Image: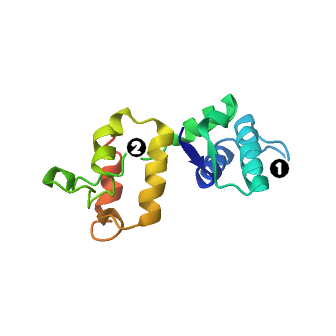
Amino acid sequence: MAAIHITDIEAAINHWRARMPSPDGVVLAPAVQALAEVYAALVYRRSTAIDEAQLGAAAMAAWLDWYATTPDTPCIAICSTSQGDDWCKGCGRSVEEVQHWPAMGPVEKRATWQRIQREGTAWRFNRYAERAPENLNENRL
């Protein structure tokens, strides 16, 4: 099973806090509460990720709602895998990741995003960074 990184849990919490702010600074929206419990458990265990199967239904629904607001693909429309490269110079995905992207689930896609962002070697992060934002929503595969 794929795992959800703590930074994605935090981003989802912030997404929901902006959508449904606390009316009194104490009470949390149900989605925030569900995600906050996961976040707290990760911090307590000093873990950086949680297996998607361990997420409760409310936390998973809240995370998926946040996920729907993120770019689906790292593609910047410069694909070197079509030229025979094992790893795309444009987006940083492997040939297999590019081929199987449409069949991958949200957690698998986010794990790939985490890896390419951590590596930071794809052209989307340096040479052609200006192309990335404009292509993110156009290339939803």
- Viewer can see residue 57: yes
- State which quadrant residue 76 falls in: bottom left
Which element is circle 2 on? loop
| Amino acid beneath label 1 | Gly
- Neighbor class of circle 2 (other Cα within 10 Å; few <14, some 14-19, many 20+) is many
Residue in the picture at 47% in, 42% down: 108
* Residue 35 vertical position relative to residue 79 in the rendered view, above or below: above
For the N terminus, which image quadrant?
top right
Frontmost residue, 107 versus 59 = 107
Give the mark toward the camera: 1 or 2. Answer: 2
| Amino acid beneath label 2 | Asp
Left or right, 124 with reference to 55: left
- State which quadrant residue 53 falls in: top right
Q: CA distance from mark 1 to mark 2?
A: 33 Å
Q: Position of residue 24 (x, y in %)?
A: 84, 46
Residue underneath mark 1: 25
Residue underneath mark 2: 72
Q: Are marks 1 and 2 in contact (CB under 8 Å)?
A: no
- Neighbor class of circle 1 (other Cα within 10 Å; few <14, some 14-19, many 20+) is few
Colouring scheme applied when the structure was drawn: rainbow
For the C terminus, which image quadrant?
top left
